[in-house]
Image: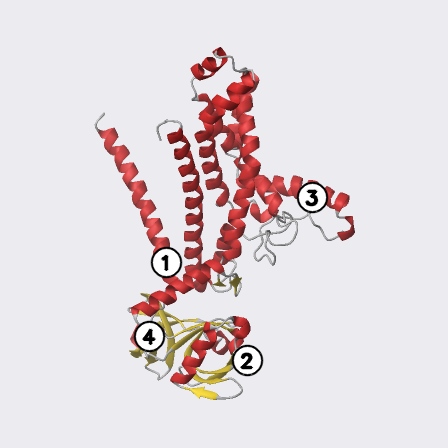
Amino acid sequence: MTRIWPWLCAASVALSLFMLGLLLALLLTRGLGHFWPSTLEVATLDSGELIAGEAVRETALPQRDGKERLYFTANRDIDGARWRWVAIDSIASRQTPTKLLRLQRGPWGDFIGYLSAYEDGQQRLEGEAAWQALATALAAPANTRPPATLVLETADGQLIRQALADIHRAQRPNAMHPGEKLRYWAHGVWQFLSEGPRAANTGGGVWPAIFGTVLMVIVMSVIVMPFGVLAAIYLNEIAHQGRLTRLVRIGVRNLAGVPSIVYGVFGLGVFVYGIGSSVDQWFFEDTLPSPTFGTGGLLWASLTLALLTLPVVIVATEEGLARIPDSQREGAVALGATRLETLTRIVLPMAMPAMLTAVILAVARAAGEVAPLMLVGVAKLAPQMPLDGDFPYLHLERKFMHLGYHLFDTAFHGDDVQAAIPLVYATALLLVTIVLVLNLTAIFLRHYLRRQRGQPC
């Protein structure tokens, strides 16, 4: 029986790593694959109708033989919908014209069809000249583009006019070679990381959410670490080790298991409606009834998550302090060091790796929390960034965007679930990446400090 346990443990580790690998592979393929230029096709139905779009997936027809294919047809301003299911048996032929065009535009979303003409008030270009003029105009900054108009044609011959100012990107994926597709993919990923959202969070980028997530985690860490470390020092180094101290430790560990939404309700009642309203009455009376601090913001969200992660920091730091041998303390006292000197020069430097472990655990939990943030400051779209060039530069009273809430809002509150699915995967991959980067940074610092002191990593 004793020989089975090592194999069971190894199998559990292998299964966990396998599931983690599957998760990352799913996020990578579904998330990053969204930005790859997909082949567009024109399907001719038995009825003679033409359908232009991107074939997304196939599924079996309900209660009958055969399959049906889902097409992303775009052109919501013309057809009233962007998706269409087509029975495969009803498709007479499929073609992939090289001039088939896909435009990312606003406010009606993508267009799939042909570019008939390019008009800029001085000339009218058609054919390949129109495409070259469009590509040149989109390569220029948005504020320098000419006031041109595009004449677009759908697969069934309908003509519409589209202002160039509303076009974000254009592609002819069927005419691209792999190098061009790779450059287009890289540019799409960069835009996703550097731009703000649009089209009800189903388009554009997530830069404000990235910035808000990282800034909130940094502010939360700055707040929680001093209080958590001081509390752990008091419990382990100063307080009398009696029944009351044991009860305090039990309470701290129980607080670590409280649902996060409870902390959100506490933050809303105490920080926002309690402290925030009082601050408005004392210092911002002229702006009332419009609240300044009496509403959700970065400060209250950071404080709420600091409370949420405080038990984690206390427990991890106290365990690190408890692992330091008493001989280290006794040796320092024997050499004439005071209790404060022993604590600051011997104990705390040796416990620094444990403190960084506490930071890792706090960041890992706080970065992915959504429920409490919905009550104390996160916003679907924040018009102003919490950090800018205006004094006092860091505006703790402003609302902010968060990747976790952006993920939730895109998945469940969008008007087009099918279009939001790839962005959900991409945002989830980005959130996991940010958490890993923050954690790896703390892990690197912890190992560096251990090597400096000759401790095993």
Establish if 330 lies above or below 454: above
Gap between marks 2 and 4, in whole Å? 28 Å
The amino acid pointed to by label 3 is Gly
Gap between marks 1 and 2, in whole Å? 37 Å
Q: Earlier in the sequence, mark 1 or mark 3?
A: 1
Whether residue 62 can be seen here = no
Which residue is located at x 50 percent, y 57 percent? 207
Establish if 247 lies above or below 154: above
Whether residue 87 can be seen here = yes
How crowded pointer 2 is (Cα within 10 Å; few <14, some 14-19, many 20+) is rated as: few
The image shows residue 399 at horizontal and vertical percentages of 61, 51
Mark 3: which secondary structure? helix
Q: Tell which tag, 2 or 4, sits nearer the viewer.
A: 2
Mark 4: which secondary structure? helix
User: Among all residues in the image, which is located at the extreme front?
Assistant: 335
The amino acid pointed to by label 2 is Pro
Residue on which the image places disc 1: 30
Which residue is located at x 55 percent, y 38 percent? 222
How crowded pointer 1 is (Cα within 10 Å; few <14, some 14-19, many 20+) is rated as: some
The image shows residue 439 at horizontal and vertical percentages of 43, 41
Q: Quadrant for the N terminus, please.
A: top left
Gap between marks 1 and 3, in whole Å? 42 Å
The amino acid pointed to by label 4 is Asn
Gap between marks 4 and 1, in whole Å? 21 Å
The image shows residue 378 at horizontal and vertical percentages of 58, 50
Residue on which the image places disc 2: 147
The disc at residue 276 is 3
Q: Earlier in the sequence, mark 3 or mark 2?
A: 2
Residue in the foreground of this view, choosing between 393 and 181? 393
The disc at residue 377 is none
The disc at residue 174 is 4
For the residues labelled 3 and 4, say whether their Cβ atoms are less than 8 Å apart. Answer: no
